[in-house]
Image (cartoon, rainbow, N blue to C red):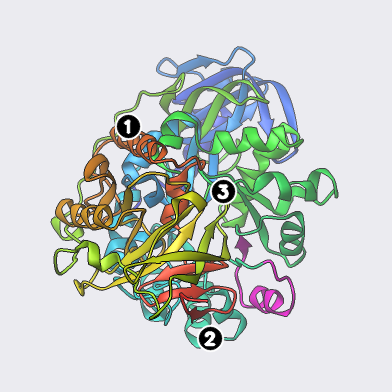
Amino acid sequence: MTDPFPSWQKVAPRLVDVAAGRTPADLVIRGGRWVNVHSGEIVENTDLAITAGRFAYCGPDASHTIGEKTEVVEARGRYLVPGLCDAHMHVESGMVTVTEFVRAVVPHGTTSMFVDPHEIANVLGLDGVRLMHDEALTAPVNVFVEVPSCVPSAPGLETAGAELGPEEVAEAMSWPGIIGLGEVMNFPGVAAGNERMLGEIIASVSAGKTVGGHYASPDLGVDFHAYAAGGPADDHEGTRMEDAIARVRQGMRAMLRLGSAWYDVAAQIKAVTEKGLDPRFFVLCTDDCHSGTLVHDGHMNRVVRHAIAQGLKPVTAIQMATLNTAEHFGLERELGSIAPGRRADLLLVSDLPSLKIDAVYGRGRLLAEKGALVADIPLYGYPEEAKNTVRLGRKLTADDFAVPAPKGKDRVGVHVVGVIENQAPTKALQRELSVVDGLVEADMTNDVAHLALVERHRGTGAVQNAFVSGFGYNRRCAIASTVAHDSHQMIVVGTDRADMAMAANRLGEVGGGVVVISEGEELALVELKIAGLLSEERAEAVAAKAARMGAAMQSCGCRLNNAFMQHSLLALVVIPELRISDKGLIDVTKFEQTELFV
C-alpha cells in the first residue's frame, strides 16, 4: 500500500502553470489575513490558489488563476492559518482507530499527526504496527507513523505481548508511511550504551529518520548528557522550565505536552516567555488524549490556545504547532506552513487568540465547517486476528486479589504507588495498613486501595498485588482496564476483592476494555475489542461510554481530573517513581524490583 497523495515532483509543472496564470486553480481563497509562520508576521489582503492538493500561489491577487471551474471562497478578512500538527501522540489513548481519531480531531484543526503505536505493538507486535500504518495511509490528512522503539519498554522488568528489536525496526523503516523511531523510553539503557537500544537508533538514523526521545527523569546530570549523545532528537517528558532549557541546549526539540491529564506547557514555556530562549526548537504536542477530550474539548487547537494564554504571541504558538514540527521531521517542504508547493492544509480562523476555527481544509479539500465534519470518512475494519487478545487462562476469584500479611502481624508497613494529579510520574509512598484474618486490607479512610496486575497475554492466570493511593475511592468498587501502558496487561484498582475479580473476569468475557464495578453491579463498560485497546465504534459513541465510565469512577469517590489516564499508567515502568508489573513492584528510580512490605 502506498500513499495516494501525489508527490510535489509529479505536480510541480501544474503548480508553476497555475501560479503563472496559464492553468486555472482548483480552489482560490480570497481576501484573508495570512499567518506566515516563516516570517512570523500576519500579511493582510492575501489570496491563495490551490491545485492538486497543494498551494500554488500565495499573494495579494490570485485573480489570474481563476477559471470557469475554479471554486472561489471569500475569506472576508479571516485568518489563514496552517493546519495544526501534533508532534507526538498515541492514537490508542483515544480508544479508537486511526480513522476515528482523524474524524474526531479534524474539526479542531489538526491536519498532521505523528503517531507512535507502541501500545498496539506491545500486544500484537510488528503486525499491529503494520495494521495502523496501513490504515494511516488511507486518511484524508497526514498521519505519519513511528516505529515503536521499546517493546517491551523495560526488558527484564515487565513482560509484554510481543518484542521488537533492531531487525524489526530496520524492516519497518522501509514502509512508506514511517517517519521515524518512536520515543526511546529505555533511557537508562541508552545512557549505559545498551547494544540493542543503540542498534535501533542507528538503524533509524541510517534510514534518514527522526529518533523520538523520552527522558523521564529530573536528573540532568551525566546520564542525561549520555542519553542526548545517544541520538534522540526530541523529548516530551519535561515538566519544569529547566527541563526544556536543558533539552534545547543539547540540540533536542523540547516537546511541550497538553494531553487529557498532562499539563506540562505552562511551566516549560517560561523558557521562552521569561528567559527569552529562541522558540524555534520548541514544539507542542498532546501525547495522550482520550476520546472525551477529543470530542468535547479539542485537540491541538486546545494546546495552542493554552500556550497563548501562558503569554506566547499567537503567531509564535502557531509556529510551535506547525512549522517547528514540520522542520523537526524534515517535512518543511511538505507541510507546516502556507507557502507554494506545500500541502494545502489550512484553517479559516475568525479570531486568532481563541483560535476560533470556521473551516478546515486538508490537501485542498473542505473537511470541516463550524466544528463539524463535512467530509465522508468511512469506517476502517480490522481483521479478526487483531481481536480476542485477553487471555486470562482461568476464572479469577476474590482470593487472587488477597495480600497475605507476615505471620503474627496485625498492622504492616507497605510501599504504595502514589498518584500525582495531571502528571505522569508517581510517588513512592509508605503506609501502615491493618491486617484482618491474616490479610492486608485496603484503607478507604486514608485513601489506600488495592492495586493488581493480571497477566492477560499468555493466559498464565498470574496476579501481582500491591496498593495505590490518590484515587479517593470511598465505597466498595473496582475498576479494571486492559489499557495499561506500556505492556498492556490488565490493571485492576479497587476497595473490594470480590468486585476486583468480577471486573477482571468481565473484561475477559468482552475481549478487553474498561469496566467499573461497585457492590457486585456493573456501572460502566467501554468495550475495546481490537487488541484490548481500540473500539470498533465511532468516536462519539466511545466518548459517550467513556463519559459514563468517568461518572461511575466519580460515584465511587474519585475526584481526580481524567482519573482513567492515571489508572492506565500504573504499570508504566519507565517513569518514576513506583509502578507495578507482572514481576511485582518496580522502583523506577533504580530500575529494579522492590518489596511490597517495608
Q: Earlier in the sequence, mark 2 or mark 3?
A: 2
Q: Which mark is residue 188?
A: none
Q: Secondary structure at mark 1?
A: helix
Percent of width and height locating residue 143: 42, 48
Q: Earlier in the sequence, mark 1 or mark 2?
A: 2
Q: Amino acid at mark 2?
A: Asn
Residue at numbered disc 2: 194
Tell me the distance, in whole angstroms, between the alpha carbons under discs 2 and 3: 33 Å
Q: Earlier in the sequence, mark 3 or mark 1?
A: 3
What residue is rendered at 74% in x and 75% in y? 221
Q: Is residue 449 left or right of residue 283?
A: left
**Quadrant containing the N terminus in the rendered view:** bottom left
Q: Does the magenta run of residues contain 47? A: no
Badge 2, how many Cα within 10 Å: few under 14, some, many 20+? some
What residue is rendered at 41% in x and 64% in y? 486
What residue is rendered at 57% in x and 34% in y? 302
Viewer-closest of 266 and 373:
266
Q: Is residue 180 left or right of residue 275?
A: left
Q: Quadrant of residue 462?
A: bottom left
Q: Nearer the viewer, mark 3 or mark 1?
A: 3
Q: Amino acid at mark 1?
A: Ala
Q: Nearer the viewer, mark 1 or mark 2?
A: 1
Instruction: Count every numbered label the image shows and give the total.
Output: 3
Q: Secondary structure at mark 3?
A: loop
Percent of width and height locating residue 44: 72, 20
Residue at numbered disc 1: 544
Q: Does residue 465 appear in this view? A: yes
Query: Are the two marked residues, 3 and 1, in contact with CB atoms closer than 8 angstroms?
Result: no
What residue is rendered at 24% in x and 56% in y? 498
Q: Which residues lie in the magenta part?
A: 218-235
Residue at numbered disc 3: 421
